[in-house]
Image: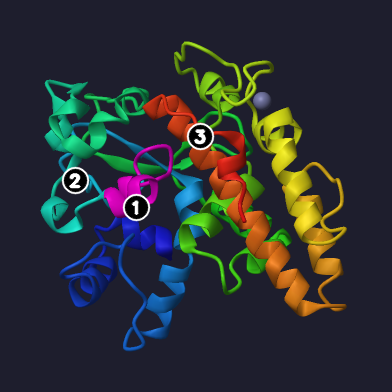
Amino acid sequence: MAWRFIKGGSLWADWMANRYLRRTNFWACRIDNNFSVTFKAILRCRPVLQTAIRRHMKDGTTTDLLLDPWLGSRSLLDILGGQLDREAGRGLTCSRIIRDGVWRPEGYPHTAQLAEEIRLVTIDASQHEDSWSWAGRGTGGGSGPFCFRSCYDLVRTHHDQAEEVDFIWGKGVARKMQLCAYRLLRGRLMTRDRLLRFGMQIPDAKCVLCNDEDESMGHLFFVCPVTWHIWTEQCAQLRGGVGMDRDIRSILSWIRDHRGRDPGWARRARVRLAASVWHIWKERNRRIFEGLTTPLLKFYIT
Ligand SMILES: [Zn+2]
């Protein structure tokens, strides 16, 4: 249903958009108690939907520059957060940074620093207009139009992981951190190994934190000697804590299995996990896109 909504073009979708989204955008709209039960349920699907679809760009005229998740399933608002002047960017579309079928991200101040990443998004002038499609299954490339099979796969996978996901969505963790942890859980962060698999030309496949091994989600978050120090520190803070399992799913189930014993501890562990993942990802992006390095000790989460 959420898919039908963002695809638009039906009487129902147009009516819902006209009723609820007059001054906002589907991706940025806050859930309001006055909304219908159906519409609230659709809005709650957004994080899942966001990681499962991909934007195909023709000329950017129907893609909201700040709010639509067109950049590797993220929106500029997800990436830049507080740096954005949302009022000044209201109503801007991606056509602002596309000229003659080529990306010109330097034309808008907030996208200049992301230029390298933006240019990896394919512009396909042969399309009728900008459009959404389902991203391929798993962590590989490929994409396809919406079909019931892909929808079923999404719902089933989502259901299988529902408990972990619910756990991530729990209270006390900022939304941007939840979203980042969720993407890691679903294998959807755009690490360099995935960019290469998507056929993108990137100059270097190495992990920017250790400059030693190739960057993958497994390496970056749980094997890299740099981030390994962070987990060791987090475990120490949680007094004997989160085991030495080197993947997010094992850590989450370990926390979940222990929450009965001490709910307060489990909440702190969950917050630390999401915050660690977020800070690692942020530091990685800062090094790649801004050329800045934060000394290791400073990006420990205290
Ligand atoms: Zn590394």
Residue that numbered label 1 is attached to? 81
Q: Residues within 10 Å of mark 1 (few under 14, many from 20)?
A: few
Residue that numbered label 3 is attached to? 294
Q: Is the shortest distance between ligand 1 and the CB of mark 3 under 8 Å?
A: no
The image quarter in which residue 192 lies: top right
Q: Using the numbered discs, state the Cα–Cα distance from disc 1 to disc 2 in whole angstroms.
A: 22 Å
Q: Is the shortest distance between ligand 1 and the CB of mark 1 under 8 Å?
A: no
> What residue sits 80% from the left and 41% below the top?
246
Q: Using the numbered discs, state the Cα–Cα distance from disc 3 to disc 2 in whole angstroms.
A: 38 Å
**Which quadrant of the rendered structure holds the N terminus?**
bottom left
Disc 1 versus disc 2: nearer the observer? 1
Mark toward the start of the polypeptide (1 vs 3): 1
Q: Is residue 297 left or right of residue 105?
A: right
How far from the left and from the top, in percent, is residue 45? 48, 65
> What residue sits 66% from the left and 58% below the top?
272
Question: In the image, is residue 229 part of the stretch drawn in magenta?
Answer: no
Colour scheme of the picture: rainbow
- Disc 1 marks which amino acid? Gly
Label disc, if present, on residue 62 of the rendered structure: 2
Hey, which residue is sitting farthest top in the picture? 203
- Please state the extent of the stretch shown in magenta in the rendering: 70-83
Mark toward the start of the polypeptide (3 vs 2): 2
